[in-house]
Amino acid sequence: MRAGVFLGAATAIAAIPAIALVILLATARVAPGPGLAALAATVLAALGLAAMVARDLHLLAETLRHAALETGTEPSPAAATPRLVPMERVALAIERLARNLAFRAAEVGRLLRANEAIIEALPDPLLVLGEDRQARRTNAAARAAFGADIPAVLRHPGMRAAIDRAFATGTGQTVELSLPVPVAREVHAAVIPMDPPLPDGARAILVLSDRSHERAVERMRSDFIANASHELRTPLASLIGFVDTLLGPAADDPPAQRRFLPIMAEQAARMNRLIDDLLSLSRIELNEHQPPADRVDLAALAAKVVAAFEPAAKARKVTLDLRATEGLPEVIADADQVAQVLQNLIDNALKYGRDGGHVQVGLAQAPSGGRWPARPGVLMTVGDDGPGIAKQHVPRLTERFYRIDAGRSRKAGGTGLGLAIVKHIVNRHRGVLGIESDEGKGAVFSVWLPAGDK
Ligand code: ADP
């Protein structure tokens, strides 16, 4: 290659003067001696110049080849520089161009990496779809949420239809879906078509947002309103019925009036209890994010609460006792709210425990670790020896209006909100509520509360 360039350049340089000298020699216009000397000098000069041209062109070709190979990295300095001045200028220009290109390529690389890092860090799952409607790229949230189920998610009929519409119309599409895999969840999907497709073949972007929590909250809210209205309407309907009877058929019937009025009083008291519980629940929820800061002596507080329940316990022939270990640390708590927790738990133990049974209130230093937090804390327990709670009910007991036996709860004056109130108070205290029950052998409700520094 280099020899070819050399011979070509030598021929191009020497051809015309050599032919002219040969003609002059042939026509005897120059003496053979000087003519041949001039011819030799011409050929030698042409060979020298051709060697320089071939070398410089080779150097330029090498510089260009390196510049093409090294895009994105700083170009390495040329091993040698051309000797001919114009060639040297060209070489310098190539080097400047290569440096410029390398700088731009590095900049583009940095921008690409920054974009990838942003997409990777997005909290919502994001998928980049190719022309075949398959995922070409996914971010960390998508891999964590769907893992190996991404193809199944893309095959969901609702999702497919939205992707097809986006591809066909070139406009963004949104759809609400219930995805069964890998776990059942409600998802909002947005398909954003790329028209024209991106250079890496991306045809659309799919962003998924998990709406399961919002939907559950919406359902809970509407269920709660429906439940609360139902709970209030039942005693209200009964009150209205009795009022109508007292105004009408029983207007002049004193024995009927004496029978109805206590029932009416009980229904009104039930509504009152329900409204009290609803109000305290909403008050507790309102300041649930603000943990209490007071120091409370639980043993003294529990003694007062237990004493107040003595008459109710006696009425059911239940022995109610309090066992507190000596030297318990104070807890960081709101005394009124902790008293309410204890009242609700003892009230339940008396309502759902055994007539003539035993209710035990305990206070002890919490064992650190296991199911309780590793920090120092006090464990408050209320146990009974009643019928207990079947396993399937335990996780739902703290839901509002959840009752195992609604009739029994209402008869005992329950509102169905007692344990919901307990849960919210414990949450506000950054505490832990535990429920254990052996069906037939009673139930133990435990509340872990954080201890203050000694
Ligand atoms: P209620 O006003 O109905 O007592 P709670 O929220 O206090 O509402 O309790 C919810 C349900 O949990 C009760 O209806 C009852 O079925 C069950 N429960 C609560 N405590 C006990 C207990 N100590 N033993 C058995 N069941 C209980």
Image (cartoon, grey):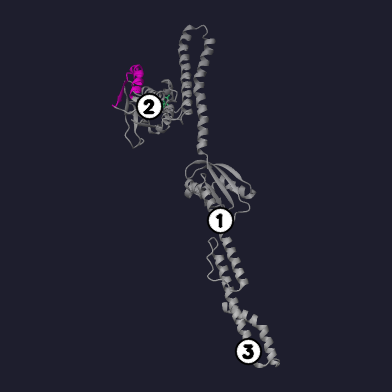
Taking the spot 45% from the left edge, 12% from the top edge, the residue there is 262
Task: From this view, report whether residue 47 is shown above or below residue 371.
Answer: below
> Which residue is identified by label 2?
295
In space, the residues marked 1 and 3 are separated at their CA atoms by: 61 Å
Q: Which mark is residue 13?
A: none
What is the span of residues highlighted in magenta in the rendered image? 299-326
| Quadrant position of residue 190 | top right
Crowd rating for badge 3 (residues with CA inside 10 Å; few <14, some 14–19, many 20+):
few
Look at the image and tell me in which quarter the N terminus lies. bottom right
Task: From this view, report whether residue 155 is shown above or below residue 13.
Answer: above
Q: Position of residue 191 (x, y in %)?
A: 58, 46
Q: Which mark is residue 37?
A: 3
Q: Earlier in the sequence, mark 1 or mark 2?
A: 1
- Of 54 and 42, which appears nearest the observer? 42
- Of 453 and 176, which appears nearest the observer? 453
The yes-or-no answer for disc 2 within 8 Å of ligand 1 is: no
Look at the image and tell me in which quarter the C terminus lies. top left
Q: Which SS class for mark 2? A: strand
Q: Position of residue 382 (x, y in %)?
A: 34, 26
Q: Position of residue 98 (x, y in %)?
A: 58, 63
Q: Main secondary structure of the magenta part?
A: helix
In space, the residues marked 3 and 2 are separated at their CA atoms by: 118 Å
Q: Amino acid at mark 2?
A: Arg
Taking the spot 49% from the left edge, 46% from the top edge, the residue there is 141
Residue at the front extreme, as displayed = 34
The yes-or-no answer for disc 3 within 8 Å of ligand 1 is: no
Q: Amino acid at mark 3?
A: Ala
Crowd rating for badge 2 (residues with CA inside 10 Å; few <14, some 14–19, many 20+):
some
Asked whether 308 falls inside the magenta stretch, the response is yes
Q: In this rendering, does residue 248 appear at all?
A: no
Asked whether 254 falls inside the magenta stretch, the response is no
